[in-house]
Image (cartoon, grey):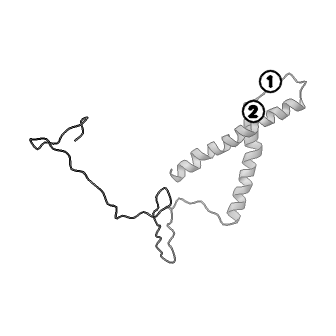
Amino acid sequence: MSYLSQMVALAIHNFTSAATGIAPRCGALRGIARHSTKLPRQLLGDLVRVTYYLLLPICLLLAVFYVSQGMIQNFLPYTKAKLVESYTIQVQKTDDKGQPVTTNVAVMVQAPKLDQKGQPLMTNGVA
């Protein structure tokens, strides 16, 4: 994903997913506190209130904190980290039983049986 799509599209999903989890709990608490009221429950209203009054202020405070600590957001391409010392890893291959696998495996190939004309003898469609 590009930087722009991460900033625009994913930010909306991050806020709405958190607000969607918090809003029903707010409605349940309001229902417990006001058990005698005849007002209908407003899940969408709770969703908007949680987003504007809880999540956005927390986000703004954290953004100011991150900027004060030197965390930046830029549109430069990713930087590749270079190793200080090069090294090589060799991993021994093992089979299912944990025994080391060798590449010198003897394979036995049987020659097909031939009929009188020298053609392979077919059994169940296989030579």
Pick the front one: 91 or 97: 97
Instruction: Classify mark 1: residues with Cα within 10 Å, few (<14), some (14-19) or many (20+).
Output: few
> Quick one: SS at disc 1?
loop
Residue 116: quadrant of the picture = top left
Q: Position of residue 101 (x, y in %)?
A: 42, 63
Check the image and name the residue furthest to the front: 116
At a point 24% along the width and 51% down the height, the residue shown is: 110
Task: Give the number of the disc on residue 45.
Answer: 2
Q: Is residue 70 left or right of residue 86?
A: right
Q: Callout 2: helix, strand or loop?
A: helix
Quick one: which residue is furthest to the top in this view? 38
For this view, does 51 lie left or right of residue 80? Answer: right
Looking at the image, residue 68 sits to the left or right of residue 112; the answer is: right
Cα–Cα gap, marks 1 and 2: 11 Å
N-term mark: 1 or 2: 1
Q: Are the two marked residues, 1 and 2, in contact with CB atoms closer than 8 angstroms?
A: no
Q: In the image, what residue occupies the spot 85% across and 32% down?
A: 30
The numbered mark at residue 119 is none
Q: Position of residue 71 (x, y in %)?
A: 64, 63
Quick check: 101 above or below 47?
A: below
* Quarter residue 17 falls in: top right
* Residue type of the residue flagged with mark 1: Pro
Within 10 Å of the Cα at label 2, are there few (<14), some (14-19), or many (20+) other Cα atoms?
A: few
- Quadrant location of the C terminus? top left
Question: Where does residue 51 sit, x and y in percent of width and height?
Answer: 72, 42
* Residue 27, placed above or below residue 67: above
Look at mark 1 in the image and give the residue it sits on. 40
For this rendering, which residue is in front, 73 or 104?
A: 104
Q: Using the image as rendered, state which of residue 119 and residue 11 is in the foreground.
A: 119
- What residue type is disc 2 on? Gly
User: Which of the pair 54/33 is nearer the observer?
Assistant: 33
